[in-house]
Amino acid sequence: IPVKIIDTLSYILVSLHHELSIMHLASRVNQNVDYFSRQFKLYTGARPMNYINEKRIERAQYLIVTSSLSYSEISLQTGFESLSYFSKTFKKFTGMSPRDYKKQIYKLGFSQVNWNNMIRYFKTKFGIGT
């Protein structure tokens, strides 16, 4: 994977709470937007905005499980401009609303999920606390 793509992936993960555009990401690595988008998809298998939204939803899933933040606060902390767009995107990636996701996790969690392992997984995935 080219260094510019690796740099972009790292930047995305630490900047999920900011507005991220393809134009901004391409300009950070001094590339044309179309060329950047093609290279990003070639090496990651995803279009830049799909990748960003996927990582935002993964972060939201972590926050839903490990915090007492409201869905509005989670949507802001994960870079979504509105709660409705956050909810729509969350459902697109997970197949359920944030509320239903939380219900399912708690329903399963108290009988089947080892919370320490789940939290360790999310911390490792996002580099939190390391």
Image: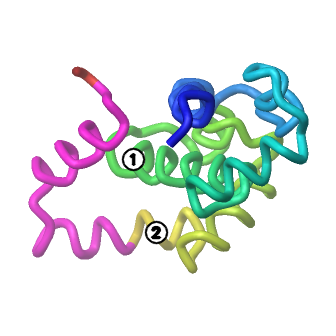
The C terminus: image quadrant: top left
Expressed as whole percent of the image width and height from the top left, the position of residue 29 reads: 73, 23
Does 107 lie within the magenta span?
yes
Image: magenta residue range? 104-128
Q: In this view, does 26 lie to the left or right of 64?
A: right
Q: Is residue 93 left or right of residue 82?
A: left
Q: Which residue is drawn at 9% across and 60% down?
A: 114
* Residue 62 numbered tag: 1
Q: Residue at x 90, y 47 (%)?
A: 34
Q: Which of marks 1 and 2 is nearer the N terminus?
A: 1
Q: What residue type is labelled 1?
A: Tyr
The image shows residue 63 at horizontal and vertical percentages of 43, 43
- At horizontal 45% and vertical 53% (from top left) the residue drawn is 61
> Where residue 119 sits: x, y (%)?
21, 45
Type of amino acid at the residue the image marks with label 2: Tyr
Q: Which mark is residue 101?
A: 2
Cα–Cα gap, marks 1 and 2 = 11 Å
| Label 1 neighbour load within 10 Å: few <14, some 14-19, many 20+ | some
Percent across and percent down for residue 97 are 60, 70
Q: Which of the 4 image quadrants contains residue 12?
A: top right
Front residue (pair 53, 40): 40
Q: Is residue 84 left or right of residue 93?
A: right
Q: Which colour scheme is used?
A: rainbow
